[in-house]
Amino acid sequence: MAERPARRVPKAHSARVVRTERLTPRMQRVVLGGDGLADFAADTCTDHYVKLLFGAEGVTYPEPFDMARIREEFPREQWPVTRTYTVRAWDPAVRELTLDFVVHGDEGLAGPWATRARPGELVRFLGPGGAYAPDPGADWHLLAGDESALPAIAAALESLPAGARAHAFVEVAGPEEEQKIDSDVEVVWLHRGTRPVGEALVEAVRGLSFPQGRVHAFVHGEAGFVKELRKLLRVELQVPREDLSVTGYWRLGHDEDGWQASKREWNARVEAEQESAAPAAS
């Protein structure tokens, strides 16, 4: 049997914190810049994401920073930990990259870091990845998600031309978490309160009177409600698979390391189950 080719390790980008801003009680913005972004490139995708690299405590990495070398020379427990965040905005003219972080107090890794980040601090990351942008050929757009999907939903709405038809639903903890989005699309803000994550969102999307014509849908956030909405769209409403961007960004009861380790298997299982129930292509 031929050996499987070695997996390519992407080059890491370096940047500096330019400024920070607390947008809402639970959303922190960090803007990155500097000459290290000279070779960073993002296209028209509105769900671009980067993987921030957090070094292991007490470990010094060789310079120039090289992920391939680190993986070859350091034990796995000393590799930098990654945390994935959607690009809220990228301005190539001034080389500024804007990332928004959901913060849960001292819980987690990236949220507390974003809260403490100060101008001049060095940041390393991989990316960008991403594959979605609103299809201008669609008759209308559906965007639905929780706080984790808010940066991508906002970027998508702001990319739509004036007059584009869209329905946008965003579930947040409460009214204090609503944000200003530069779009003429009216966002339906759903306040979770003490309800389970995604429950209000699933109710709202199911209660929508779906317009006629081809929909291009973007549904992201907690994996449980994403599964339910994928079933609604793909199985019940028979939306073609190619018109769906539907992914669980996170899953209740799992940190990012645990979710990323099981995400591919989870998505494959969900897709197989739902595709078997979906109508065959005509």
Image: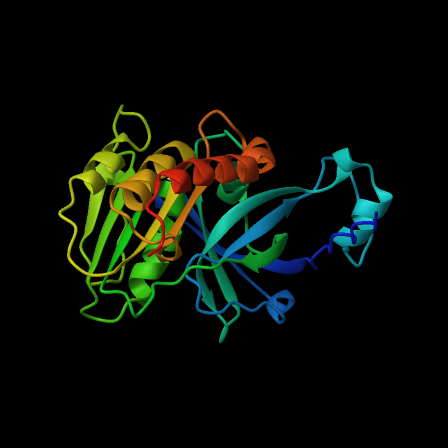
In the figure, residue 205 lies in which quadrant? top left
251 displayed left or right of 173: right
Residue found at the very far front of the displayed protein: 282
In the figure, residue 233 lies in which quadrant? top left
Residue found at the very far right of the displayed protein: 73
- Colour approach in the figure: rainbow
120 displayed left or right of 177: right
Residue 157 image position (x, y, % from top left): 29, 60
Residue found at the very far left of the displayed protein: 209
Question: Residue sitting at 72 percent across and 37 percent down?
Answer: 56
218 displayed left or right of 252: left
Q: Nearer the viewer, residue 221 or 123?
A: 221
Q: How many marks?
A: 0
Q: Nearer the viewer, residue 122 or 266?
A: 266
Q: Quadrant of the C terminus?
A: bottom left
Residue 57 image position (x, y, % from top left): 72, 35
Q: Nearer the viewer, residue 15 or 167?
A: 167
Residue 232 image position (x, y, % from top left): 28, 40
Question: Residue sitting at 52 percent across and 67 percent down?
Answer: 42
Q: Is residue 145 visible?
A: no
Q: Nearer the viewer, residue 132 or 3?
A: 3
Residue 162 to residue 204: above or below = below
Residue 58 image position (x, y, % from top left): 76, 36
Question: Residue sitting at 70 percent across and 42 percent down?
Answer: 80
128 displayed left or right of 200: right
Q: Is residue 233 visible?
A: yes
